[in-house]
Image: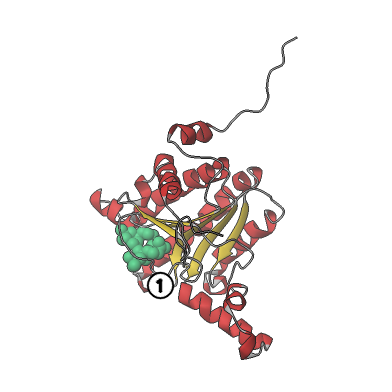
Amino acid sequence: MSIVSSSKEFPILAQARAQGIDLGALPHHVAIIMDGNGRWAKRKGLARLLGHREGYMTLKKVIRAASDLGIKYLTVYAFSAENWRRPEDEVAGIMKLIEKATREELQNMHKNNVRINVAGRIEEVPAGLRDALLHGIETTAANTGITFTLAVNYGGRAEIVDAVKAIVTSGVPADQIDESTISNHLYNAAQPEPDLMVRTAGEMRWSNFLIWQSAYCELHVTNVTWPEFTEVDFLEAVKVFQQRTRKFGTVVDQPQ
Ligand code: IPE
Ligand code: IPE
Ligand code: MG
């Protein structure tokens, strides 16, 4: 009688090892500024919305890759609080796309043990999208795999303003406020801060994403636009992260 192993390894794990990644030292929380959808579309002579649609295809692959790799938290910037300044039809198209994507992917993510979460002023987005997001959060609340946070109508400064309002409302005396008071009132206070932030399409800026939480986050900017971004690019970002020396203000080899 032969014993056949039933535990099949995810292909991304072998790929990660082949790329030189240490699977025991993965970032805990990866944040991604998914940029360049418009430029990708323009280069192809397509409407910007088709760039966003293609970006959705990339996101599906990246969630799967991060989840199979064993990363615990993935937060992606889908729509900023400043993106309302875009043409009305683009804004409406993005809102519809996020709603459709959330509904379409729910069962698949649930099956893969993904926990869905949001960051941003969700109360201000169209009702259909808000309902889809809340339904996703509720359905996957007990899942124990990767926590996938969609930042929608998210602004880092707005988040800090919301935290300050909550602190004032709670009546904490001013002399008892410290950094942890602010951290504990952010949208996803229970999550570890991102240790790796990836931005696609080459811009060297934060664009108001997780500005408090990313104080000591490692940044990786790639020129690849988001619709072209692949699992290999994701693994490359993880590899670059593992080559960095994180010091948090100390000196390397400092005696403890
Ligand atoms: C990112 O792609 C998606 C959103 C901001 C919603 P962009 O639409 O910003 O793409 P570019 O920067 O114009 O190329
Ligand atoms: C940041 O990208 C927001 C998202 C990716 C959702 P933007 O394209 O809006 O950033 P800026 O305008 O180039 O700074
Ligand atoms: Mg952009």
Q: Residue furthest top?
A: 1
Q: Residue at x 40, y 66 (%)?
A: 91
Q: Please indicate whether residue 142 sits to the left or right of residue 129 in the image.
A: right
According to the picture, the residue beneath numbered tag 1 turns out to be 84
Q: Quadrant of ligand 3?
A: bottom left
Percent of width and height locating residue 250: 47, 64
Q: Position of residue 38 (x, y in %)?
A: 31, 57
Please state the total of marks drawn on the protein image.
Answer: 1
Side (left or right) of 50 relative to 248: left
Q: Is residue 90 visible?
A: no
The image shows residue 2, relative to residue 47, as above or below, that is above
Q: Is residue 125 above or below residue 163?
A: above
Observer-nearest residue: 187 or 183?
183
**Horizontal and vertical percent for residue 26?**
53, 47
**Looking at the picture, does residue 10 appear above or below residue 170?**
above
Camera-side residue of 119 and 160: 160
Q: Quadrant of residue 168?
A: bottom right
